[in-house]
Amino acid sequence: MNRGDILELLRGGDKQLFARAAAARDAAIGPAIYLRGLIEYSNICSKDCLYCGIRKSSISGKYTLESKQILRAVKYAINNNYGSIVLQGGENYAPAHIDKIEHIVREISKTGLGITLSLGEQSPETYRRWFEAGASRYLLRIEASDRALYEKIHPYDDSYDRRLKALRDLREAGYQVGTGVMIGVPFQTVENLANDLIFMREMDIDMCGMGPYIVAENTPLAAYSALLEPEEMRLEMTLRMIAILRLMMPDINIAATTALQAIDPDGRLRAIDAGANVVMPNLTPTDAKKAYTLYKNKPMELDMRILERNVQYGERGDSAHFSARKSSCGSENNL
Ligand code: 5AD
């Protein structure tokens, strides 16, 4: 699929796009949906991204879960036959934080659950330590693969190059690597979105999480809301992005993200019907879940209808793309 083909699909040129993507998923990896219990570890972040509700300068209450709260969520995941958990939180380089994550990952890995981390940019050594402790997947969205757009919404020195380096370091450390972008950010063009998909293919990613941009109150980007497409259009574009990526990379894991459900109660189900195969029910204790306000109207409840889909209980649901790359020796590593 070339850039022209992708643009045509992004512009709505194929009424069968979602059905074709779901069929491509079923043919490549089957209709199975995998669950990951999401644990939002902390909203303390050293980054000040212009769109994010838990940015460094947000003044709302900061929290960090205690180990016993995390282990309680892990127990819930086990009791409900989840195969994997995701530990997500703000970016923090404090040695005590890095040690604590290493320790908790080691504890969780004893249970046999698959562990995904989503804790931002870290040093190669930190990535290595967490991997050795038992984490096997890592999510680090590129957010916007266009350098100029990236730098506009992340105005720090060398921010884009550091992001790319972190993605390479993750691959190097041995993780299944996930990335993704927000869709409908002010200043983003449909050409940017086409290039985002090409970026993911060139990076040969294993997993992807993409969601619509949703205004977060008291953030600098909220001042640009007049530039936004209507929410329903941002949702539709996210579904198209998921479906096109599924056609481009049939055997990767693609998440039906929570932000979709912030716009439409059916959002995550619609993503599954457009080719997604992973859902991350939120297992964070309620008070912390409320304080982890990435954006407005974050859904607090799982849409139970998801659990009626083809959920594979008890399975880790590793990326088939990763396994295929591992077993085809001598293959090029593009990261
Ligand atoms: N709207 C949508 N997604 C957001 N994220 C952060 N802020 C917002 C927002 N306002 C996403 C980022 C990040 C993920 C954890 O949450 O893409 O990678």
Image (spheres, rainbow, N blue to C red):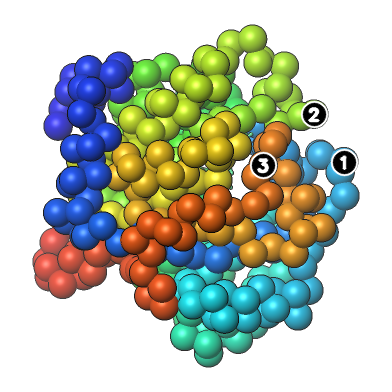
Label 3 Cα crowd, 10 Å radius (few <14 / some 14-19 / many 20+): some
- Tag 3 residue: 298
User: Residue at left 45%, top 64%?
Assistant: 35
Q: What residue do we see at 87% from left, 41% from top?
A: 59
Where does the image place residue 42, in percent across and percent down from the top left? 73, 59
Q: Are marks 1 and 2 in contact (CB under 8 Å)?
A: yes
User: Residue 68: which disc?
Assistant: none
**Farthest residue, direction bottom:** 110
Identify the residue under disc 2. 218
Earlier in the chain: of badge 3 and badge 1, it is 1
Helix, strand or loop at disc 2?
loop
Separation of disc 3 and disc 2 at Cα?
Answer: 15 Å
Q: Is residue 105 above or below residue 13?
A: below
Q: CA distance from mark 3 to mark 1?
A: 18 Å
Q: Amino acid at mark 2?
A: Asn
Label 1 secondary element: loop
Camera-side residue of 40 and 92 = 40
Secondary structure of the residue carrying tag 3 is: loop
Q: Is residue 301 above or below residue 55?
A: below
- Using the rendered image of the protein, determine whether residue 45 is visible from the camera's viewpoint: no
Which residue position holds label 1? 59
Quadrant in which residue 86 is drawn: bottom right
Q: Quadrant of ligand 1?
A: top right
